[in-house]
Amino acid sequence: MKEEYEVSVKHKKEKKIEEKTPEEKKPDAESDTKSEDSASTTSTDSENSDASSTDSTDKKSEEPEISKEEETETRMEKRSRKHTYKLDIKRSGKSHKAYSESKTLMAEGRSVLKIFKEYEQNKLRTAESKNRLETLLYSIPSVTEDESIMAFGTEKEAEDLKQAAKDLDDWFFEDEAYTADWKVFDRKYKDLNGRMKSLRFRKEESEGRDELLSIFSVRANQSSKNISQMSTSRPWISQEKLDAAQKKIEEIVEFIEGKAKEQREMGLQEDPVLLSSVLKQKTDDVKNEYERLRLIRKPVEKKEKK
C-alpha cells in the first residue's frame, strides 16, 4: 500500500549570472587599444600594487559575512512510502482429484456440453429455416406476375397465393416470429411452397409430356417388332413366352393411350392424370419385355454316348 505526503526540504540558492548590457559590451578594436595602454601602465601599476593590496585586505575585513542560512531556501516536495501488512490466509474447502479422474464431474461436464451443443444446433437450424422461408416469400411476386406459370392456375389459386404471402409478411413483424423455432418456420414453408409447387408441377408436366409420349410410342413399336421376329431368329424360345410378352406390351400401350386421351380433355389448371414418371416407367417396362426374351440362351445339345 502506497501513501503520499509532503515534506519541506532545504536547497541551495542558485546563483544568478548577470548579463552585460549592450553599453558594457564594446567593440574588439577598443579593447585592443586598451590592452596597449594597459601594457604601458603595467609598470606603474606594479609599483602601486603593494599599497593597494594592503588597502583591499582592510576592505574585505570591513565587508559583512554571508551566513549559510541566507544561502539556502525551503521548498515542499511530494514523497511516497509503502506500508506492508501481513495477511493470514486460511485454506477452506476440499481438494479434489484431477477433473478427468472424477466420474461424477466428467458426467456433469458432458451433460452441460450436450445442452450447449443442442442449443447451438437448434439456433443454427432455426436461422436456416427462417432464411429459406424469407427467400420463398420474396420469390412469390415474380411467380404471380409470370403469365406462363399463372396460366396453369385458377384465379382463386392466384388470389390465395397473394393473400398467403401478405399474411406471412405481416407475421414476420409479430412477437411470435421472434420466438419461433425451426419447426414453425418449416411448417409455414411447407404450406406456402405447396401452393407454388402445384403451379410449377402442372407447367413442367405439360411441357415434357409430348416428348415422352413419342419416346414411348417408338419403344413400344420397336419392342413388339423385335419380339415378333424371334419366332424365326430364336426358335428355341417357346411361342407361349412370345405371345405373353406381346400381350403385356399391348396392355401397356392401351393403358398409356387411355391416359393420354383423358389428359387431352383436361384443362391446364387441373392436376395431370398422365405423369412423366409413369411414362418413363412404362417405357422401361416395354423395353424389359424384349430384353428378358433376348437374354434366353440357346440350350446346349447333349451328345449321344457311343
Image (cartoon, grey):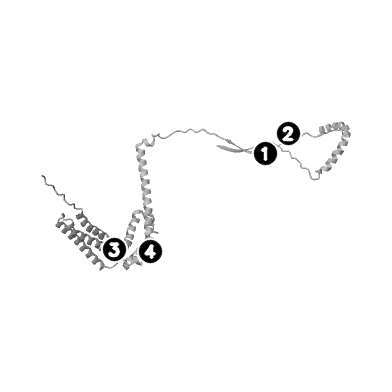
Q: Earlier in the sequence, mark 2 or mark 1?
A: 2
Give the alpha-carbon distance from disc 2 to disc 3, as whole Å.
Answer: 124 Å
The 10 Å Cα crowd at callout 1, few under 14, some 14 to 19, many 20 or more, is few
Q: Quadrant of residue 236?
A: bottom left
**Residue 110 visible in the shown view:** yes
Which amino acid, by three-letter code, is at mark 4? Answer: Ser
Give the residue number, with chain letter if any, for mark 2: 68
Q: Quickly name the residue at label 1.
A: 75
Please tell me which residue lies in front, 84 or 202.
Answer: 202
Q: CA distance from mark 4 to mark 3?
A: 28 Å
Q: Considering only vertical position in the picture, is 64 above or below 211?
A: above
22 in relation to 196, above or below? above
Residue 142 marker: 4
Q: Position of residue 46 (x, y in %)?
A: 87, 32
N-terminal of the pair, mark 1 or mark 3, is 1
Tell me whether the residue at label 1 lies in contact with that at label 3, contact meaning CB atoms closer than 8 angstroms.
no
Front residue (pair 87, 292): 292
What residue would you read off at disc 3?
211
Instruction: Tell me the crowding category of disc 2: few under 14, some 14 to 19, or many 20 or more residues within 10 angstroms, Cα based.
Output: few
Q: Residue at x 67, y 39 (%)?
A: 75
From the image, state whether disc 4 or disc 3 is nearer to you. Answer: 3
Quadrant location, the C terminus? top left
Question: What amino acid does circle 2 point to?
Answer: Lys
How far across and how far down the image is residue 3, in percent? 58, 37
